[in-house]
Image (spheres, rainbow, N blue to C red):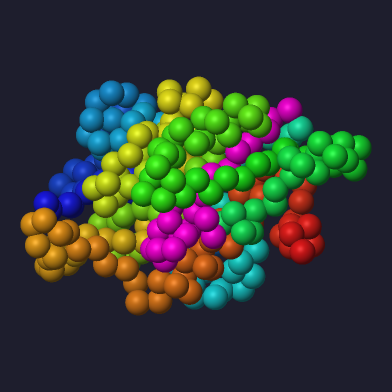
Amino acid sequence: MRITRTDLALETVEDLRCGGDISRLDGVAVAEYTRQGYGVTDVRVTSPQGAASLGKPEGRYITVDLRPYFRREEQFFRRAVECLACELRTLLPGTGEDCPVLVAGLGNRGMTADAVGPLALESLLVTRHMVRALPRQFRGFTPVSALAPGVLAATGMETLELLRGAVQATGSAAVIAIDALAARCRDRLCATVQLGDTGLIPGSGVGNHRKAINARTLGIPVVAVGVPTVIAASLLGESGGEDEPLFLTPRDIDEKVRELGRLIGYGVSLALQEGLSVEDVTGLLG
């Protein structure tokens, strides 16, 4: 099995740009800008033709280039968190006490390249219980619940099944699903965050397709937050064989996944709790 796909809409756009101007493709619009010193690319797919060309559902795909973060530029963490929070907020249906949100950290905590979702929950400000117990003190806060559903082999249950139950129990108005992705370009491994409003299919990047998690299957908006952590070895001229495809990760994957989990946890927290700062989140997490 040869896997050459990518989970990143930006990489598909770049392929289409070869030999032509993407702006001329019906149903696809691309905007590039800088926020807090980080490059952002906003891809909007607005027609069935555009969806077919990109192989992605209609919707928005926002990519943040994190290379300034790993160059440790001035105030790199704070600026990256604020960039992610601002972009993520544009995809949410709303925030505040009337818009409870479930944050799902997808993936296998015991497998480093697949652990970014569960690790992000460790830096997420979970507030549902505080809002319920102390409504006056936490007035205006978004009620946030968190769930790390694990993987099918460990639970015997599809991630979608677990999320449906959690959504029903918490009365969530939206889901934010955090997961690891697959890239086509090695330079984007652990150096990119993709945000999207079309949900996701767990495991699709490595050919292990599970049931889709999106607005159609859950009945509420689903915002996906993903970090590419693997690339198919076949794209680099290597192979693990037809029956055992090989995937590669960066050499320092452990350190980077831990950092990215913390970054995403803070970014989601600030997106959901408008008015808080990075320092506020640190104090509340402590």
Query: Residue extending furthest right?
Result: 136
**In the rendering, at what x and y percent does residue 30 appear?**
37, 41
Above or below residue 108? Residue 130 is above
Q: Quarter of the image holding residue 97?
A: top right
* Residue at the spot 27% in from the left edge and 67% down from the top edge: 248
**In the rendering, at what x and y percent does residue 232 appear?**
22, 60
Query: Residue extending furthest left?
Result: 242
Residue 11 visible in the displayed image: no
Query: In the figure, is residue 217 to the left or right of 90?
Result: left
- Count of residue discs: 0
Q: Nearer the viewer, residue 22 or 91?
A: 91
**In the rendering, at what x and y percent does residue 249 appear?**
32, 68
Query: In the figure, is residue 244 to the left or right of 127?
Result: left
* Residue at the spot 54% in from the left edge and 60% down from the top edge: 119
Q: Magenta span covers which residues?
A: 98-119
Q: Nearer the viewer, residue 239 or 22?
A: 239
Above or below residue 39? Residue 143 is above
Residue 162 visible in the displayed image: yes
- Name the quarter where the C terminus is drawn: bottom right
**In the rendering, at what x and y percent does residue 15 appear?**
21, 49
* Residue at the spot 42% in from the left edge and 39% down from the top edge: 157
> Is 117 covered by the magenta stretch?
yes
* Residue at the spot 74% in from the left edge and 59% down from the top edge: 285
Above or below residue 220? Residue 111 is below
> Is 160 covered by the magenta stretch?
no
Q: Quarter of the image holding residue 191?
A: bottom left
